[in-house]
């Protein structure tokens, strides 16, 4: 078995993506991280097929999220030592976020390939790293759109493409959104319904978080923190502001935060697979909570089925993902490599590559054990969206 996503511990890579798992690795992961589920593949086709190389995208993600996680671990340590966060060195913080922003800009990933974090304890440090990174990629993609639109409409072609929006406040806001949950960290482990007072504290974490930070902290960043649970359709908290009142950075962070929380299987027992979450947020029942234009861009950055993933088709044959489809990540390019009985086809009998988007007669049904037939459904036409339910768990406060 080969590991799809790198496993991270406190911002550092523990096991690299692509590593062949030994029995010792598996035993160690099982005993230490019982709730962990990792995505694995068969390395068997590696020397026969040409796979898209996504190591660059992984490398950029590792570096960017690692830097932010280490910064947030430091912030958490200060909090634990009862040092006020209002004394944080804002200048140094702004500078290091600016550096990561520049690094991402200079290394342009095309897909957001996140790693799996292993330490449940420091979810509040790991989660910001992912939210930061996803927000940055979405922000960069949108900035380009804004820049090209402006170039097309005006004669101001001499302006630098990054003139319009600086992404540093977006990054600062994104990494600190859940800082207000620090005092409530124990609630993540609570095996009981939360009390009324605890719920009020949870719903207040956006405002409480902004108030914990120094006065010199980026005002736009603080605004993002205060509004990061507001929904596009006005059903969010704390104020229930509708999409047209929400800054574009808020709408970006909302998507990044919801996606990362909803897929955090090591934290929430009810978390879901990346494919399921992405589908629910784009065309599924929760789409009205997110800015639809941004969601479209986001879906192109997320790859729910990694290179090398084995998808079972409706006829029982198995196909291996060899290239991403950036327009529709649910329908990647595959090679049919296993027959109905799971036997590997001889090299000269391999079929493809086929785009699942063009070959609609080839339908994917399973990814590992997971039934993925929902990727062909669209509740925009199939059924009306459900009404938002009353929240009973912390997971529901985070997703949808
Ligand atoms: Fe939050
Ligand atoms: Fe969050």
Image (cartoon, rainbow, N blue to C red):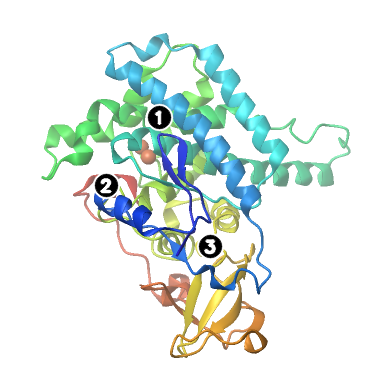
**Dot 3 surroundings within 10 Å: few (below 14), some, or many (20 or more)?**
many
Q: CA distance from mark 1 to mark 3?
A: 34 Å
Q: Position of residue 119 (x, y in %)?
A: 33, 40
Write down the residue under mark 2.
Answer: 32
Q: At 72% across and 32% down in the image, what residue appears? A: 164
Is residue 167 visible in this depiction of the protein? no
Asked if the residue at tag 3 contacts the one at tag 1, i.e. Cβ–Cβ closer than 8 Å, the answer is no
Q: At 59% across and 84% down in the image, what residue appears? A: 360
Relative to 128, is 362 above or below? Answer: below
Residue located farthest toward the top when viewing the structure as drawn = 87
Is residue 153 visible in this depiction of the protein? yes
Q: Position of residue 332 (x, y in %)?
A: 59, 70
Ligand 2 neighbours mark 3 (CB distance < 8 Å): no
**Numbered badge on residue 333:** none
Q: CA distance from mark 1 to mark 2?
A: 36 Å
Relative to 88, is 327 above or below? Answer: below
Ligand 1 neighbours mark 1 (CB distance < 8 Å): no
Q: Position of residue 322 (x, y in %)?
A: 62, 69
**Numbered badge on residue 306:** 3
Q: Secondary structure at mark 3?
A: loop
Is 266 or 156 nearer to us in this picture? 266
Image quadrant occupied by the N terminus: bottom left
Is 57 or 358 nearer to us in this picture? 57
Q: Position of residue 363 (x, y in %)?
A: 51, 83
Side of 190 relative to 356 (left or right): left
Side of 207 relative to 308 (left or right): left
**Front tag of 1 and 2:** 2
């Amino acid at each position: 078995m080969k590991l799809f996503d790198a496993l991270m511990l406190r911002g550092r890579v523990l096991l690299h993506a692509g590593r062949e798992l030994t029995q010792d690795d598996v035993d160690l992961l099982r005993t230490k991280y019982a709730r962990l589920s990792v995505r694995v593949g068969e390395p068997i086709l590696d020397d026969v097929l040409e796979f898209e190389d996504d190591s660059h995208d992984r490398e950029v993600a590792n570096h960017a999220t690692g830097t932010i996680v280490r910064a947030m671990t430091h912030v958490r340590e200060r909090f634990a030592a009862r040092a006020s966060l209002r004394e944080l060195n804002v200048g140094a913080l702004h500078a290091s976020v600016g550096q990561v922003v520049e690094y991402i800009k200079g290394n342009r990933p095309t897909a957001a390939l996140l790693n799996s974090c292993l330490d449940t304890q420091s979810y509040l440090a790991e989660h910001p790293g992912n939210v930061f990174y996803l927000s940055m990629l979405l922000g960069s993609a949108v900035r380009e759109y804004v820049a090209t639109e402006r170039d097309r409409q005006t004669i101001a072609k001499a302006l630098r493409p990054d003139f319009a929006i600086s992404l540093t406040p977006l990054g600062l806001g994104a990494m600190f959104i859940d800082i207000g949950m620090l005092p409530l960290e124990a609630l993540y482990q609570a095996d009981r319904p939360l009390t009324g007072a605890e719920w009020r504290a949870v719903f207040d974490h956006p405002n409480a978080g902004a108030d914990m930070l120094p006065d010199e902290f980026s005002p736009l960043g603080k605004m993002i923190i205060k509004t990061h649970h507001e929904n596009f359709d006005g059903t969010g908290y704390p104020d229930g502001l509708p999409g047209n009142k929400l800054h574009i950075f808020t709408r970006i962070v909302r998507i990044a935060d919801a996606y990362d929380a909803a897929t955090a299987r090591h934290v929430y027992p009810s978390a879901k697979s990346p494919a399921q979450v992405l589908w629910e947020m784009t065309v599924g029942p929760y789409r009205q909570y997110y800015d639809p234009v941004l969601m479209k861009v986001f879906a192109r950055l997320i790859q729910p089925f990694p290179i090398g993933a084995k998808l079972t088709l409706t006829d029982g044959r198995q196909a291996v993902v060899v290239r991403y489809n950036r327009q529709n990540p649910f329908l990647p390019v595959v090679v049919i490599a296993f027959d109905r009985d799971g036997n590997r086809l001889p090299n000269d009998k391999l079929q493809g590559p086929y785009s699942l988007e063009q070959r609609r007669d080839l339908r994917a049904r399973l990814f590992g054990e997971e039934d993925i037939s929902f990727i062909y459904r669209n509740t925009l036409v199939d059924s009306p969206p459900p009404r938002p339910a009353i929240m009973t768990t912390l997971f529901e406060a985070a997703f949808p």
